[in-house]
Amino acid sequence: MKRIHVLMTALRLLSILLIPMLLLTGCSRKDAAAPTKPVRVSATKAFEEHFGPAPTTDKGSCYAFVIFFPSAKDPAKAVPFPFFTFDQASLKKVAVQRLMGGMADLKSYQGELLQPFPPGTRLLSVEEGSGVVTVNFSPEVLRAKEDDAADRALVNAVVLTFTQFEGVKTVRIQVEGKDSRLSQLVKRVDQRAVLPLPPPRLLSVTAMKEKGDRYVGEVNAFFDRPVDIKLLQMTAADGSVFHGDIYHSVFDMAAVLKPKDPSLFKAGMPVRVRWQVVDKKGRASEGSSDLLLEVKEH
Protein backbone atom coordinates (compact mmCIF):
# COMPACT_ATOMS: atom_id res chain seq x y z
CA MET A 1 0.00 0.00 0.00
CA LYS A 2 1.27 3.44 -0.87
CA ARG A 3 2.27 5.89 1.84
CA ILE A 4 -0.78 7.51 3.44
CA HIS A 5 -1.18 11.24 2.90
CA VAL A 6 -3.73 13.94 3.67
CA LEU A 7 -5.80 14.38 0.54
CA MET A 8 -9.26 15.93 0.81
CA THR A 9 -9.91 19.60 1.33
CA ALA A 10 -12.08 20.82 4.19
CA LEU A 11 -14.86 21.74 1.79
CA ARG A 12 -15.01 18.17 0.51
CA LEU A 13 -15.04 16.98 4.07
CA LEU A 14 -18.16 19.00 4.76
CA SER A 15 -20.06 17.51 1.83
CA ILE A 16 -18.87 14.00 2.67
CA LEU A 17 -19.24 13.86 6.40
CA LEU A 18 -22.74 15.25 6.52
CA ILE A 19 -23.73 11.95 4.88
CA PRO A 20 -23.49 9.52 7.80
CA MET A 21 -22.81 11.82 10.71
CA LEU A 22 -21.35 11.98 10.22
CA LEU A 23 -20.29 12.61 11.97
CA LEU A 24 -18.95 15.89 11.48
CA THR A 25 -20.24 19.41 11.39
CA GLY A 26 -19.62 22.44 9.21
CA CYS A 27 -15.93 22.23 8.27
CA SER A 28 -15.88 24.89 5.55
CA ARG A 29 -15.00 28.24 7.03
CA LYS A 30 -14.25 30.56 4.10
CA ASP A 31 -12.41 33.25 6.05
CA ALA A 32 -9.97 30.90 7.80
CA ALA A 33 -6.46 31.42 6.44
CA ALA A 34 -4.70 28.11 5.87
CA PRO A 35 -1.47 27.75 7.86
CA THR A 36 1.66 26.89 5.93
CA LYS A 37 2.18 23.82 8.11
CA PRO A 38 -0.34 21.38 9.57
CA VAL A 39 -1.49 22.36 13.05
CA ARG A 40 -3.15 20.23 15.68
CA VAL A 41 -6.90 20.60 16.00
CA SER A 42 -8.03 22.18 19.28
CA ALA A 43 -9.80 19.42 21.20
CA THR A 44 -11.83 19.23 24.38
CA LYS A 45 -10.56 17.05 27.21
CA ALA A 46 -13.51 14.74 26.56
CA PHE A 47 -12.39 14.26 22.96
CA GLU A 48 -8.85 13.37 24.02
CA GLU A 49 -10.15 11.06 26.74
CA HIS A 50 -12.30 9.03 24.36
CA PHE A 51 -10.46 9.37 21.04
CA GLY A 52 -6.87 10.25 21.87
CA PRO A 53 -4.80 13.15 20.49
CA ALA A 54 -6.65 15.29 17.97
CA PRO A 55 -5.55 15.03 14.32
CA THR A 56 -3.86 17.85 12.44
CA THR A 57 -5.21 20.07 9.67
CA ASP A 58 -3.81 22.63 7.25
CA LYS A 59 -7.23 24.17 6.57
CA GLY A 60 -7.41 26.71 9.41
CA SER A 61 -8.30 26.68 13.10
CA CYS A 62 -10.55 23.73 13.79
CA TYR A 63 -12.19 22.40 16.94
CA ALA A 64 -12.81 18.79 17.95
CA PHE A 65 -15.46 17.83 20.46
CA VAL A 66 -17.79 14.99 21.43
CA ILE A 67 -21.52 14.44 21.04
CA PHE A 68 -22.96 12.06 23.62
CA PHE A 69 -25.90 10.01 22.30
CA PRO A 70 -28.05 7.90 24.65
CA SER A 71 -27.54 4.15 24.45
CA ALA A 72 -30.57 2.10 23.39
CA LYS A 73 -29.42 -0.77 25.62
CA ASP A 74 -29.10 1.45 28.70
CA PRO A 75 -30.67 4.92 28.31
CA ALA A 76 -28.90 6.09 31.48
CA LYS A 77 -25.60 5.65 29.61
CA ALA A 78 -24.18 7.60 26.68
CA VAL A 79 -22.11 6.72 23.61
CA PRO A 80 -19.47 9.28 22.49
CA PHE A 81 -18.97 10.30 18.85
CA PRO A 82 -16.31 12.68 17.45
CA PHE A 83 -17.23 15.91 15.66
CA PHE A 84 -15.26 18.77 14.11
CA THR A 85 -16.06 22.36 13.20
CA PHE A 86 -14.27 25.55 12.16
CA ASP A 87 -17.01 27.75 13.65
CA GLN A 88 -15.92 28.50 17.23
CA ALA A 89 -18.46 31.28 17.67
CA SER A 90 -21.46 28.92 17.38
CA LEU A 91 -19.74 25.80 18.68
CA LYS A 92 -22.26 25.00 21.42
CA LYS A 93 -25.25 25.67 19.18
CA VAL A 94 -23.78 23.39 16.53
CA ALA A 95 -23.27 20.69 19.16
CA VAL A 96 -26.86 20.67 20.43
CA GLN A 97 -28.29 20.86 16.91
CA ARG A 98 -26.27 17.82 15.91
CA LEU A 99 -27.44 16.03 19.05
CA MET A 100 -31.04 16.83 18.13
CA GLY A 101 -30.45 15.51 14.62
CA GLY A 102 -29.74 12.06 16.02
CA MET A 103 -27.99 9.19 14.27
CA ALA A 104 -30.86 7.49 12.45
CA ASP A 105 -28.96 7.72 9.17
CA LEU A 106 -26.06 5.74 10.59
CA LYS A 107 -26.95 2.19 9.56
CA SER A 108 -24.00 0.65 11.36
CA TYR A 109 -25.46 1.82 14.68
CA GLN A 110 -29.15 1.11 14.07
CA GLY A 111 -30.79 -0.23 17.21
CA GLU A 112 -27.90 0.88 19.40
CA LEU A 113 -28.67 4.59 19.87
CA LEU A 114 -31.73 6.46 21.06
CA GLN A 115 -33.18 9.65 19.62
CA PRO A 116 -33.79 11.50 22.89
CA PHE A 117 -35.80 14.40 21.42
CA PRO A 118 -39.51 13.98 20.65
CA PRO A 119 -40.58 14.78 17.06
CA GLY A 120 -41.07 18.48 16.39
CA THR A 121 -38.67 19.70 19.08
CA ARG A 122 -36.95 22.96 18.10
CA LEU A 123 -33.97 24.72 19.59
CA LEU A 124 -35.04 28.25 20.54
CA SER A 125 -31.78 29.62 21.92
CA VAL A 126 -28.44 28.89 23.55
CA GLU A 127 -27.12 31.53 25.93
CA GLU A 128 -23.97 31.56 28.04
CA GLY A 129 -22.76 33.71 30.92
CA SER A 130 -20.76 33.34 34.15
CA GLY A 131 -20.11 29.67 33.50
CA VAL A 132 -23.81 28.86 32.93
CA VAL A 133 -25.18 27.64 29.59
CA THR A 134 -28.93 27.99 29.21
CA VAL A 135 -30.45 25.94 26.41
CA ASN A 136 -34.05 26.72 25.54
CA PHE A 137 -36.32 24.27 23.67
CA SER A 138 -39.82 24.42 22.20
CA PRO A 139 -42.72 22.77 24.13
CA GLU A 140 -42.49 19.59 22.03
CA VAL A 141 -39.43 18.58 24.09
CA LEU A 142 -41.82 17.64 26.92
CA ARG A 143 -43.57 14.38 26.19
CA ALA A 144 -47.35 14.39 26.69
CA LYS A 145 -46.92 11.47 29.07
CA GLU A 146 -44.07 11.87 31.53
CA ASP A 147 -41.33 9.31 30.91
CA ASP A 148 -38.56 9.54 33.49
CA ALA A 149 -36.16 7.24 31.62
CA ALA A 150 -36.57 9.12 28.33
CA ASP A 151 -36.28 12.50 30.03
CA ARG A 152 -33.13 11.43 31.85
CA ALA A 153 -31.59 10.18 28.61
CA LEU A 154 -32.23 13.55 26.99
CA VAL A 155 -30.86 15.55 29.93
CA ASN A 156 -27.79 13.31 30.25
CA ALA A 157 -26.98 13.79 26.56
CA VAL A 158 -27.39 17.58 26.71
CA VAL A 159 -25.44 18.08 29.94
CA LEU A 160 -22.58 15.73 29.02
CA THR A 161 -22.22 17.43 25.64
CA PHE A 162 -22.16 20.98 27.05
CA THR A 163 -20.02 20.46 30.14
CA GLN A 164 -17.06 19.24 28.09
CA PHE A 165 -16.47 22.82 26.92
CA GLU A 166 -14.02 24.94 28.86
CA GLY A 167 -15.65 27.39 31.26
CA VAL A 168 -19.04 25.63 31.39
CA LYS A 169 -19.86 24.83 35.01
CA THR A 170 -23.63 24.53 34.92
CA VAL A 171 -26.30 23.72 32.31
CA ARG A 172 -29.88 24.96 32.51
CA ILE A 173 -32.54 23.34 30.34
CA GLN A 174 -35.62 25.47 29.75
CA VAL A 175 -38.84 25.16 27.79
CA GLU A 176 -39.97 28.43 26.22
CA GLY A 177 -37.77 30.30 28.67
CA LYS A 178 -39.11 28.61 31.79
CA ASP A 179 -37.88 25.81 34.03
CA SER A 180 -39.63 22.44 33.73
CA ARG A 181 -39.31 18.91 35.00
CA LEU A 182 -36.19 18.58 32.83
CA SER A 183 -34.51 21.30 34.90
CA GLN A 184 -34.65 19.14 38.01
CA LEU A 185 -32.98 16.19 36.29
CA VAL A 186 -29.82 18.19 35.57
CA LYS A 187 -28.67 17.66 39.17
CA ARG A 188 -28.89 13.88 38.71
CA VAL A 189 -26.55 13.66 35.71
CA ASP A 190 -23.59 11.36 36.30
CA GLN A 191 -20.50 12.60 34.48
CA ARG A 192 -19.21 9.02 34.49
CA ALA A 193 -22.25 7.68 32.61
CA VAL A 194 -20.32 7.13 29.38
CA LEU A 195 -19.89 3.67 27.90
CA PRO A 196 -16.36 2.51 27.02
CA LEU A 197 -15.74 2.52 23.30
CA PRO A 198 -15.32 -0.76 21.40
CA PRO A 199 -12.77 -1.06 18.57
CA PRO A 200 -13.23 1.16 15.48
CA ARG A 201 -16.15 0.39 13.20
CA LEU A 202 -16.53 0.77 9.44
CA LEU A 203 -19.54 2.94 8.67
CA SER A 204 -20.00 3.30 4.94
CA VAL A 205 -18.42 3.47 1.50
CA THR A 206 -19.08 6.70 -0.37
CA ALA A 207 -17.73 7.86 -3.73
CA MET A 208 -17.34 11.56 -4.49
CA LYS A 209 -17.43 13.25 -7.85
CA GLU A 210 -17.40 16.81 -9.08
CA LYS A 211 -20.74 18.15 -10.24
CA GLY A 212 -21.19 17.36 -13.89
CA ASP A 213 -18.38 14.81 -14.03
CA ARG A 214 -19.13 11.43 -15.52
CA TYR A 215 -16.98 9.41 -13.14
CA VAL A 216 -16.11 9.54 -9.46
CA GLY A 217 -12.84 11.05 -8.28
CA GLU A 218 -12.37 9.14 -5.04
CA VAL A 219 -13.98 6.43 -2.93
CA ASN A 220 -14.10 6.83 0.86
CA ALA A 221 -14.33 4.12 3.50
CA PHE A 222 -15.61 5.95 6.59
CA PHE A 223 -14.89 4.91 10.16
CA ASP A 224 -16.57 6.07 13.36
CA ARG A 225 -13.47 7.91 14.67
CA PRO A 226 -10.00 9.04 13.59
CA VAL A 227 -7.88 6.00 12.74
CA ASP A 228 -4.52 4.99 11.32
CA ILE A 229 -4.99 2.80 8.25
CA LYS A 230 -2.84 -0.31 8.28
CA LEU A 231 -4.59 -2.11 5.43
CA LEU A 232 -7.42 -1.09 3.11
CA GLN A 233 -8.55 -3.02 0.05
CA MET A 234 -11.73 -2.65 -2.00
CA THR A 235 -12.99 -5.38 -4.33
CA ALA A 236 -15.95 -5.85 -6.65
CA ALA A 237 -18.63 -8.53 -6.38
CA ASP A 238 -16.60 -10.86 -8.60
CA GLY A 239 -13.55 -10.51 -6.35
CA SER A 240 -11.54 -8.24 -8.65
CA VAL A 241 -9.48 -5.63 -6.81
CA PHE A 242 -10.03 -1.92 -7.34
CA HIS A 243 -6.53 -0.56 -7.85
CA GLY A 244 -5.34 2.91 -6.94
CA ASP A 245 -3.55 4.98 -4.32
CA ILE A 246 -4.80 4.97 -0.73
CA TYR A 247 -4.79 8.14 1.37
CA HIS A 248 -5.99 9.35 4.76
CA SER A 249 -8.85 11.83 4.70
CA VAL A 250 -8.79 15.09 6.60
CA PHE A 251 -9.16 14.35 10.34
CA ASP A 252 -8.27 10.69 9.66
CA MET A 253 -11.94 9.67 9.58
CA ALA A 254 -11.71 7.75 6.32
CA ALA A 255 -9.44 5.83 4.00
CA VAL A 256 -9.61 7.33 0.50
CA LEU A 257 -9.06 5.32 -2.68
CA LYS A 258 -7.99 7.33 -5.73
CA PRO A 259 -9.00 4.74 -8.35
CA LYS A 260 -6.96 4.03 -11.44
CA ASP A 261 -10.18 3.27 -13.32
CA PRO A 262 -12.98 5.53 -12.01
CA SER A 263 -15.44 4.16 -14.57
CA LEU A 264 -15.77 0.95 -12.53
CA PHE A 265 -17.74 2.67 -9.76
CA LYS A 266 -21.52 3.03 -10.01
CA ALA A 267 -24.06 4.08 -7.39
CA GLY A 268 -25.62 1.12 -5.57
CA MET A 269 -23.00 -1.43 -6.60
CA PRO A 270 -21.73 -3.82 -3.91
CA VAL A 271 -18.21 -3.13 -2.68
CA ARG A 272 -16.31 -5.42 -0.35
CA VAL A 273 -13.99 -3.57 2.01
CA ARG A 274 -11.19 -5.33 3.85
CA TRP A 275 -9.50 -3.28 6.53
CA GLN A 276 -7.06 -3.16 9.41
CA VAL A 277 -7.10 0.04 11.45
CA VAL A 278 -5.97 1.34 14.85
CA ASP A 279 -7.50 4.34 16.57
CA LYS A 280 -5.52 6.99 18.46
CA LYS A 281 -6.05 5.14 21.76
CA GLY A 282 -4.56 1.93 20.40
CA ARG A 283 -7.84 0.04 19.85
CA ALA A 284 -7.45 -2.12 16.76
CA SER A 285 -10.00 -3.69 14.46
CA GLU A 286 -9.97 -5.65 11.24
CA GLY A 287 -12.57 -7.25 9.11
CA SER A 288 -14.33 -7.52 5.77
CA SER A 289 -17.73 -6.01 4.95
CA ASP A 290 -19.97 -5.90 1.90
CA LEU A 291 -21.52 -2.44 1.47
CA LEU A 292 -23.54 -0.72 -1.23
CA LEU A 293 -21.73 2.23 -2.78
CA GLU A 294 -23.18 5.70 -2.27
CA VAL A 295 -22.23 8.39 -4.79
CA LYS A 296 -22.31 12.06 -3.79
CA GLU A 297 -21.60 15.20 -5.83
CA HIS A 298 -19.82 18.26 -4.50
Image (tube, helix red, strand yellow):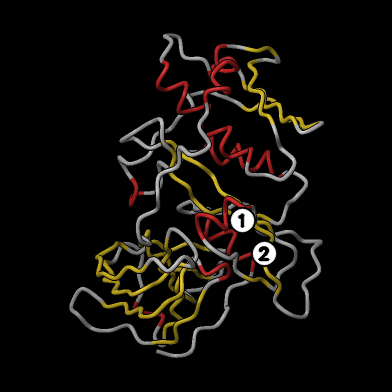
Q: In which quarter of the image is the C terminus?
A: bottom right
Examine the rendered structure and indicate whether residue 87 appears above or below residue 217: above
In the rendering, at what x and y percent does residue 61 appear? 74, 63
Horizontal relation, residue 12 to residue 256: left or right: right
Element at badge 2? loop
Type of amino acid under label 1: Phe
Where is mark 2, residue-wise?
41
**Residue at (47% x, 21% y) in the render:** 151
- Residue 242 shows in the view: yes
Examine the rendered structure and indicate whether residue 63 appears above or below residue 230: above
**Residue at (44% x, 39% y) in the render:** 78
Q: Which residue lies furthest to the bottom in this view?
A: 2
Examine the rendered structure and indicate whether residue 74 appears above or below residue 201: above
- Residue 215 shows in the view: no
**Distance of label 2 from label 1 (alpha carbons):** 9 Å
Type of amino acid under label 2: Val
Where is mark 1, residue-wise?
84
Q: In which quarter of the image is residue 284?
A: bottom left
Crowd class of label 1 (few under 14; some 14 to 19; many from 20; radius 10 Å): many
Pointer 2 or 1: first along the chain = 2
**Residue at (51% x, 76% y) in the render:** 248
Residue in the foreground of this view, choosing between 284 and 114: 284
Q: In which quarter of the image is residue 63?
A: bottom right
In the rendering, at what x and y percent does residue 296 appear? 48, 62
